[in-house]
Image (cartoon, rainbow, N blue to C red):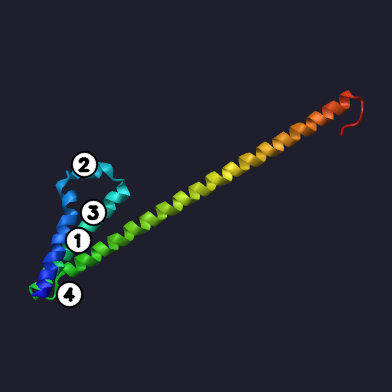
Amino acid sequence: QGKVAACQEALRAVAEHMQPLCAANPQDVQRKLAPLEEAELQVAMAYGVASLYFSRLCMQGIDPGDHPIKQELERIQMYFKKVRAAKEELVVREEAKDRLRVDAEAAQRIVKHYTAAAEAATQRMLVGRRQGGEPA
């Protein structure tokens, strides 16, 4: 009886946690998410449903290892890995873009510094010529 009560309490917690998402219009939720976030949500919801069915089979005394739900869970886990890989690739791209931006800013500072130094040298040379002497 303790396991059943614990299971019921866990299901209540899941239902309470999912209530805001389930109450929202799917198109509204979809509009607010980036494509990668939407993929994460879809995979997570599919995994949640499949896991609940897996649990139901266990509670009925059916071995889920021989049931097609086992293959479905493995397929969904493969999609989890794909979404995670895409997310990591996106982070790497963003970091690379930031590094390029920082390098471009540093290059700009260096060019400004040497341009100013060259202009100062040119000015000294012109002043030296006007005064009739050799360039400084």
Q: Name the secondary structure under disc 4.
A: helix
Which residue is under mark 4? Answer: 65
Hey, what amino acid is under mark 3? Gln
At 30% from the left edge and 47% from the top edge, which residue is drawn? 35
Relative side of 94 to 17, left or right? right
At 75% from the left edge and 35% from the top edge, which residue is drawn? 118
The label shown at residue 48 is 1
Going from the N terminus, do you reach mark 4 or mark 3 first? 3
Which residue is under mark 2? Answer: 28
Relative side of 6 to 83, left or right? left
Task: Place residue 136 in its image quadrant.
Answer: top right
Distance from the alpha carbon under mark 4 to that under mark 1: 17 Å
Contact? badges 2 and 1 (CB < 8 Å): no
The label shown at residue 42 is 3
Task: Place residue 89 in its image quadrant.
Answer: bottom left
Please state the horizontal and vertical placement of residue 112, each as a whole percent of the image: 66, 36
Hey, what amino acid is under mark 1? Gly
The crowding category of the residue bearing disc 4, from other C-alpha atoms within 10 Å (few below 14, some 14 to 19, many at least 20), is: few
Going from the N terminus, do you reach mark 2 or mark 3 first? 2
Please state the horizontal and vertical placement of residue 30, each as a whole percent of the image: 24, 44
Distance from the alpha carbon under mark 4 to that under mark 3: 24 Å
Relative side of 116 to 7, left or right? right
Give the number of the mark in front: 4 or 1: 1
Hey, what amino acid is under mark 4? Gly
